[in-house]
Image (spheres, rainbow, N blue to C red):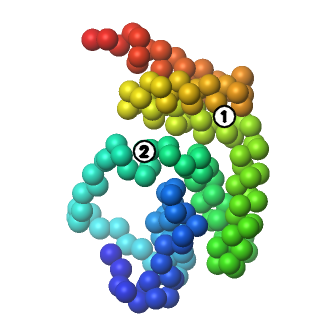
Amino acid sequence: MWCRELFDEIGYFPEYFSGIYGDDHYWSFKAVQKYPIYFLKDCLYYYRINPGSITNVLDDRRKLIAQDIIAELHRLVTNTGTDWLEQGKPEEGLAFEKQLFHNKPLMAKRYGMWAAKAVDKKNWTQAKDLLKKHFSQSKTDIDGYRTLIYYIRSRYLNKG
């Protein structure tokens, strides 16, 4: 919970994250830099897991690297006090995204992660497609083989 003045001071969620997730995480990081946060034992709200939520549907390729974008923004703010969003330089973010998309080991990990999520949802077509993309990026990543085994077991062997 926060007051309106906090939005006035820090700003609203950046449009840079439109279509992917992370805007709330980034915003919270900015707020915590200026003000303390407190832990309350009381449950003030419940989180509903929705299979169609923005974090569960891979409808934008940028979702594959959203966590890496957020990590880089945190790193920049921690080391320099600012980042490309604050500076109004979205082209630097786009250049960083391009660099991530060309990082084959990283992309293999991200495709594998989303493939496992697709298996969890029993979305066999998407899981298969993501596993193919994973192995097109890396044939040696052990996590991809674990996810492949998870796919096979879930799809073909767990028919109980």
Q: Is residue 107 above or below residue 122?
A: below
Q: Identity of the amino acid at label 2?
A: Asn
Q: Is residue 42 above or below residue 139?
A: below
Query: Residue 118 placed where, x, y %?
Result: 45, 32
Q: Identity of the amino acid at label 1?
A: Ala
| Numbered tag placed on residue 56 in the rendering | 2
Q: Residue at x 76, y 51 (%)?
A: 99
Q: Residue at x 48, y 20 (%)?
A: 151
Left-right relation of 4 to 64: left
Marks 2 and 1: in contact by CB < 8 Å? no
Left-right relation of 21 to 92: left
Which corner quadrant holds the C terminus?
top left
* Local SS, label 2: loop
Query: Residue 157 placed where, x, y %?
Result: 39, 10
Query: Residue 55 placed where, x, y %?
Result: 44, 49
Residues 74 and 41: in front is 74
Within 10 Å of disc 2 (Cα), the crowding (few <14, some 14-19, many 20+) is: some
Residues 16 and 152: in front is 16
| Numbered tag placed on residue 108 in the rendering | 1
Q: Residue at x 64, y 73 (%)?
A: 85
